[in-house]
Amino acid sequence: MAVIEAQALDMSAILMQAYDLGDLIKDSAETADYLYWKQKKEEDPKVQELLKQFQKKKELFDECQRFGHFHPDYHSALEQAQSIQSQLDNLEAVSRFKEAEQRLDDLLFTVSELIARSVSETIKVPSNDPLAAGGSCSSGSCSTGGSCSGSCG
């Protein structure tokens, strides 16, 4: 029974430290900046109007996409959706939100990577970066039988 009790104590200590780490991340400048720009984006009437327009154009494009490039309105629908997306991206609230979101994602990835590497160099670390998932050493592809460029070490 002593071994089980010791394991339970270890697990509870780990969980408490994880909660403390979560609190530190929630209280970070990256999280505060992310939440600030998220609110600004949600309150901006221009953003909301463009989002409604984008949703309509996206639905039109999705309908055209079912038939692929051969649909007569495919390219037009794609251009219209891209145009509205570009207008959205040029708004300060949206661009700042995306920057803050990326900084927060980078923080979370860094913390995840530090935790994983403290356990083992071969543990996969999830990332939102499509380039990192495609065969970089941090994705763990060499150790898991995935494709490997041989540049990991």
Image: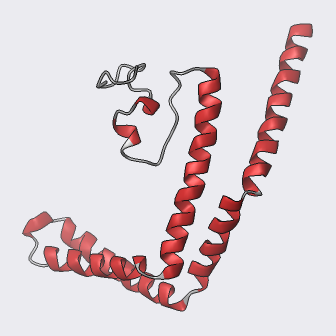
Q: Residue at x 37, y 83 (%)?
A: 87
Q: Residue at x 57, y 64 (%)?
A: 100
In the drawing, does residue 68 fall left or right of residue 60? left
Q: Decide which of 75, 100 is in the foreground and name it.
A: 100
Q: Residue at x 50, y 85 (%)?
A: 48
Image: 1 above or below 130: above
In the drawing, does residue 139 fall left or right of residue 149? right
Count of labels shown? 0
Q: Give the image location of residue 18, x and y in percent.
A: 77, 38
State whether residue 69 appears in this view: yes
Image: 129 above or below 52: above
The quarter in which the C terminus is drawn is: top left
Q: Give the image location of residue 74, x and y in percent.
A: 15, 73
Q: Give the image location of residue 41, x and y in percent.
A: 56, 79
In the drawing, does residue 14 fall left or right of residue 70? right
- Which quadrant of the view contains residue 66? bottom left
State whether residue 1 appears in this view: no
- Which quadrant of the view contains residue 101? bottom right
The quarter in which the N terminus is drawn is: top right
Q: Decide which of 16, 91 is in the foreground and name it.
A: 91
Q: Residue at x 56, y 44 (%)?
A: 109
Image: 115 above or below 122: below
Image: 135 above or below 48: above
Q: Give the image location of residue 88, x and y in percent.
A: 41, 80
- Which quadrant of the view contains residue 75? bottom left
Q: Decide which of 39, 149 is in the foreground and name it.
A: 149
